[in-house]
Image (cartoon, grey):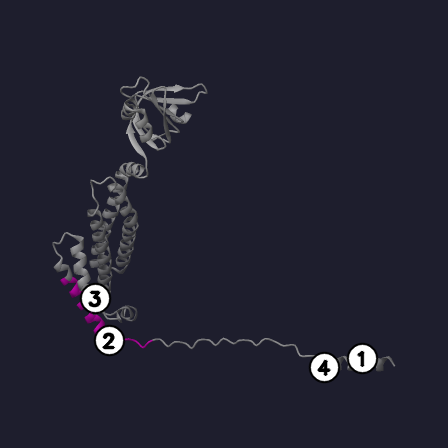
């Protein structure tokens, strides 16, 4: 009896499973593997001969190009000659040259072909660098050197071109390391010279940036609405006409230069620095200078300070929120 009941339950469960709706399954996308690409057949003797001939032709054209500019001392002239001859030089080097270097490492012309490729790479470098130098030189020449913002414009050019000149040095060094590893003596000599030239230019412009930094800061200060003045001139302007003095200086940042008459401590022990000024009994007062800065100043020392405000106090010019230049 129990056996029959168990069998009946099993049959019912089987029937229920057969009548259950089928569960839909998403189709599985199959990705076909790409067909293998057969490597190109080795270069034929005729192709190898063409590579060697093209390498010789590229070197010949480069020598002719260099002969055209021998003695030329202006980057624009050099760039123009190279640009004119470059298409022919690039076209002269066979497209199979790189394959030749890989497939024929023991060929008697291997180094000649490698040398030609290196010379062409050098040509590209020379065209880019001489063009850049010509553009930079023309931009510098276009600046009015007597203009009030000449240094600002020059600094803008340095910010634009210096990164490229510095990259040029690194590129030249990398190429020098590469041809040195190849044992390409002729190109080692060429790239050594290029590294030296690129380094000289980059270091020279970096030096200019340091050299003219003071002028740049002064010009930028004035260009942004600041006023640069000596303590003597400020006191003179106040004595001449206080109304005109306020109209000229009030509300502006002032960069003042003068010799320290005294360094005093006020009621709250905060420092007040007085600059000597002809025609003014007290001189010009500088307020807001940090205590640590004032402690390192000396009577008779000439300083330059940038202040955020000016007014008149007891017949003397008084400047506030002053920062002494280091």
- Which contiguous range is marked in magenta? 40-64
Instruction: Between label 3 and label 1, give the one nearer the viewer.
Output: 3
Q: CA distance from mark 3 to mark 4?
A: 79 Å
Residue at 24% x, 44% y is: 204
Residue at 30%, 69% in the rendered image: 102
Q: Is residue 156 magenta?
A: no
Label 3 vs 1, first from the N-terminus: 1
For marks 2 and 3, give the CA distance.
22 Å
Residues packed near mark 4 inside 10 Å, few (<14), some (14 to 19) or many (20 plus): few
Q: Tell me the CA gap for discs 2 and 1.
A: 84 Å
> Looking at the image, which is closer to me, 124 or 53?
124
Whole-percent x and y of residue 10?
Answer: 78, 80
Q: Residues within 10 Å of mark 3 (few under 14, many from 20)?
A: few
Which numbered disc, 2 or 1, marks the residue that appears first in the sequence? 1
Crowd around label 2: few <14 · some 14–19 · many ≥20 (10 Å): some
Are the residues tagged 2 and 4 within 8 Å (C-beta)? no
For residue 9, the mark is 1
User: Which circle, 2 or 3, is nearer the viewer?
Assistant: 3
List the residue tagged with mark 4: 19
Residue shown at 26%/57% (left/top)? 180
Magenta-colored stretch includes residue 53:
yes
**Would residue 256 appear left or right of 188 to someone viewing this image?**
right
Q: Quadrant of residue 113?
A: bottom left
Q: Position of residue 37 (x, y in %)?
A: 39, 76
């Amino acid at each position: 009896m129990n056996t029959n009941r168990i069998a009946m339950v099993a049959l019912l469960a089987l029937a229920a499973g057969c009548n259950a709706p089928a569960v839909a399954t998403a189709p599985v996308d199959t990705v076909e593997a790409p067909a293998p690409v057969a490597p190109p057949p080795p270069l034929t003797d005729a192709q190898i001969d063409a590579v060697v001939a093209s390498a010789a032709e590229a070197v010949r054209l480069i020598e002719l190009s260099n002969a055209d500019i021998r003695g030329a001392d202006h980057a624009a002239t050099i760039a123009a000659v190279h640009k004119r001859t470059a298409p022919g030089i690039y076209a002269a080097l066979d497209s199979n040259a790189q394959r030749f270097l890989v497939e024929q490492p023991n060929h008697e012309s291997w180094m000649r072909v490698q040398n030609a490729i290196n010379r062409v790479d050098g040509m590209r470098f020379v065209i880019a660098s001489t063009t850049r130098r010509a553009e930079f030189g023309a931009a510098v020449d276009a600046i009015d050197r007597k203009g009030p913002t000449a240094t600002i414009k020059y600094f803008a050019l340095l910010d634009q071109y210096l990164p490229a000149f510095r990259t040029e040095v690194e590129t030249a060094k990398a190429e020098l390391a590469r041809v040195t590893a190849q044992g390409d003596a002729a190109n080692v000599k060429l790239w050594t010279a290029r590294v030296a030239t690129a380094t000289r230019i980059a270091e020279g412009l970096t030096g200019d940036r340091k050299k003219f930094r003071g002028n740049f800061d002064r010009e930028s200060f004035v260009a942004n609405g600041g006023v640069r003045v000596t303590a003597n001139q400020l006191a003179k302007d106040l004595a001449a006409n206080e109304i005109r003095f306020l109209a000229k200086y009030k509300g502006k940042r002032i960069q003042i230069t003068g010799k320290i008459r005294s360094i005093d401590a006020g009621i709250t022990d905060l420092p007040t620095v007085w600059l000597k000024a002809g025609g003014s009994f007290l001189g010009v007062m500088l307020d807001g200078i940090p205590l640590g800065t004032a402690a390192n100043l000396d009577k008779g020392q000439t300083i330059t300070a940038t202040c955020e405000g000016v007014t008149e106090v007891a017949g003397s010019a008084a400047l506030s929120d002053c920062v002494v230049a280091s």
